[in-house]
Amino acid sequence: MATLLDKLPTPAAVRRRRAAERDARIMGSALIGMGVLHFAVPGPFDSIVPPEIPGDARTLTYASGAAEAAIGVGLLVPRTRRLSATAAVALFVAVFPANVNTLRLFKDKPLLLAGAVARLPLQVPMITTALRIRRES
């Protein structure tokens, strides 16, 4: 027979949940900020849309900005956090071609190229953090 104490979360589970909540606030706020930037200064985002992707670059910039902002808001709301974390993973995978395209665009600009190369591996912790947020929500 299970007692009330058996149903309480372990201290480790409480720490994991609190860390996921903190990460959701950070990621959510960052996504909202980036989403707003897509509308405030769309030019740089337009420029990294790979030409191989069909559609108008500005439309894709606005669509990805709206998606980022919406996912960010969803991460801030506990009730929608799990679904939004899943959407964040999909978003990070979807924008990866644009991040790779920056390598092609900046091949003759060493400083910008270094930044673009450094940014690519950051997708991995962003995805794993979103997955952890999902799991703990």
Image (spheres, rainbow, N blue to C red):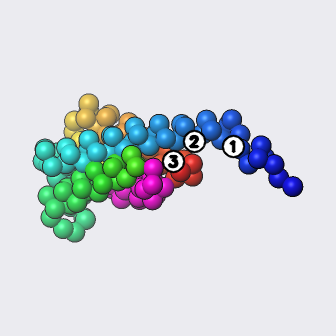
Q: Nearer the viewer, mark 1 or mark 3?
A: 1
Q: Amino acid at mark 2?
A: Arg
Identify which residue, 103 or 5, lies in the foreground. 5
Q: Position of residue 10 (x, y in %)?
A: 71, 40
Local crowd at mark 2 within 10 Å, few (<14), some, or many (≥20)?
some
Pointer 1 or 3: first along the chain? 1
Res. 128 visible in picture: no
Q: Amino acid at mark 1?
A: Pro
Majority secondary structure of the magenta segment? helix
Alpha carbon separation for disc pair 1 and 3? 17 Å
- Residues at circles 3 and 2 in contact by the CB criterion of under 8 Å: no
Residue 9: image tag? 1
Alpha carbon separation for disc pair 3 and 2? 8 Å
Identify which residue, 68 or 44, lies in the foreground. 68
| SS state under label 1 | loop
Occupied quadrant, residue 118? top left
Residue topped by disc 3: 133
Q: Position of residue 91 (x, y in %)?
A: 37, 56
- Residues at circles 1 and 2 in contact by the CB criterion of under 8 Å: yes
Alpha carbon separation for disc pair 1 and 2? 10 Å
Local crowd at mark 1 within 10 Å, few (<14), some, or many (≥20)?
few
Identify which residue, 1 or 40, lies in the foreground. 1
**What residue span does the magenta drawing correspond to?**
78-98
Residue shown at the point (24%, 64%) measured from the top left: 52
